Amino acid sequence: MTKEVSVREIMGDLLDINPIVNVGTTKTPMYVVDSSWLIRAYEKSIGKDIGDDFDGYVEFSDKFVDEFTMSNDVELTLEKII
């Protein structure tokens, strides 16, 4: 039997930080993601330091951006990509 782990359990206090900044306008948003937050989220999702696994990080980042664009919700985005 496998226990399902929630995103909040995996990410912990990272979800208390808003890593997204809208540098556009309400009508035409353009978001910037804090890369240090995204690296830490990736490390927590794989359970180890990033090391030389930049391909995995790039894939994670691309998925994060795609999902966030659709949902506009950090926690929901992480639930979908982890």
Image (spheres, rainbow, N blue to C red):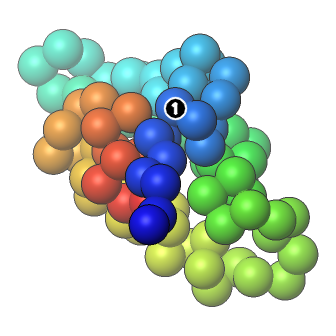
Question: Across the whole image, how many numbered discs are drawn on residues?
Answer: 1
Q: Residue at x 68, y 22 (%)?
A: 13
Residue 11 locus on image (x, y percent): 61, 38
Q: Residue at x 65, y 29 (%)?
A: 12
Crowding at dot 1, Cα within 10 Å, few <14 / some 14-19 / many 20+, comes out as: some
Q: Amino acid at mark 1?
A: Arg
Residue 38 locus on image (x, y percent): 62, 48
User: Circle 1 sits on which residue?
Assistant: 8
Instruction: Check the image and name the residue furthest to the left.
Output: 27
- Residue 65 shows up from this direction: no
- Residue 40 shows up from this direction: yes
Closer to us: 28 or 64:
64
With respect to residue 39, does 58 lie above or below?
below
Closer to us: 50 or 66:
50
Looking at the image, residue 72 sits to the left or right of residue 37; the answer is left
Which quarter of the figure has residue 27?
A: top left
Looking at the image, residue 17 sits to the left or right of residue 33; the answer is right
> The residue tagged with tag 1: helix, strand or loop?
helix
With respect to residue 73, does 43 lie above or below?
below
Closer to us: 50 or 61:
50
With respect to residue 60, does 16 lie above or below?
above
Q: Residue at x 56, y 73 (%)?
A: 58
| Quadrant that contains the N terminus | bottom left
Closer to us: 1 or 15:
1
Q: Residue at x 86, y 64 (%)?
A: 49
